[in-house]
Amino acid sequence: MKAKTTVASAIQIGNPVSFKKAVRELKYFDGVVEQVTDKELLDAKAVVDASGISVCPNSGAALAGLKKLAAKGVIKRNDTVVVILTAHGAKFSKSAIDYHRGKKGKFSNQPKIIGANLASVENALGLKK
């Protein structure tokens, strides 16, 4: 299947170097593959980002896939699951900024513009009385 245009740019690689390894592991562990939309992956990314762990859109795809597979019952409540988060979100800040500025995401959080000084940061965080 050819990947469509997506904010998860690494997914669009036409001939991934590790494709054969990935298929081998998928078969070995009797794995499954799930599709997600950009909206689903950006919502999943926003939830994890809000916890203080900034993930890339590609990792958001893995997280959204996990969520869908759990909702379908493919992944059971007591299953042990590992989701590999491949890159830090700072490398892909445009997708996060667009998501939050667009007000279209379920977890959109409008950015606040503040002064470039410590007092402004403290005020924005509610640290200054």
Image: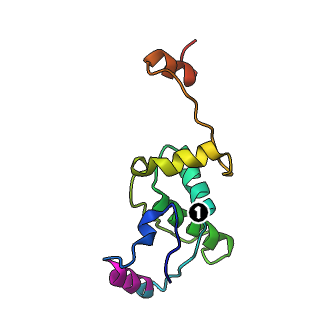
Above or below for 19 versus 51: below
Task: Judge the density around disc 1: few (<14), some (14-19), many (≥20) Cα neighbours within 10 Å.
Answer: some
The location of residue 85, given as percent across then percent down, is 43, 60
Q: To which quarter of the image does residue 37 belong?
A: bottom right
Q: Is residue 24 left or right of residue 115?
A: left
Residue furthest to the top in view is 129
State the extent of the magenta-drawn residues as a range: 18-26
Q: Is residue 20 magenta?
A: yes
| Residue 35 drawn above or below residue 54 | below
Give above or below for 63 relative to 96. Answer: below
Q: Nearer the viewer, residue 74 or 14?
A: 14
| Residue at (44% x, 22% y) in the render | 116
Q: Position of residue 17 (x, y in %)?
A: 30, 77
Colour scheme used in the picture? rainbow
Q: Quadrant of the C terminus?
A: top right
Locate residue 75, reporting x and y percent: 60, 74
Q: Position of residue 109 (x, y in %)?
A: 63, 41
Disc 1 marks a residue whose amino acid type is: Asp
- The reply, left or right, for residue 49 in relation to residue 67 is left
Tell me if residue 24 comes above or below residue 13 in the rendering.
below
Residue farthest to the left, as pictured: 17
Q: Helix, strand or loop at disc 1?
A: helix
Going 62% across and 38% down the picture, which residue do you hit?
110
The residue where tag 1 is placed is: 38
What residue is drawn where x is 57% and y is 50%? 46
Does residue 29 appear to the left or right of 20 in the view shown?
right
Q: Quadrant of residue 100?
A: top right
Left or right for 102, reference 4: right
User: Where, by quadrant of the figure, is residue 128 drawn?
Assistant: top right
Residue 90 falls inside the magenta stretch: no
Q: Nearer the viewer, residue 39 or 51?
A: 39
The residue drawn where x is 66% and y is 76% is 73
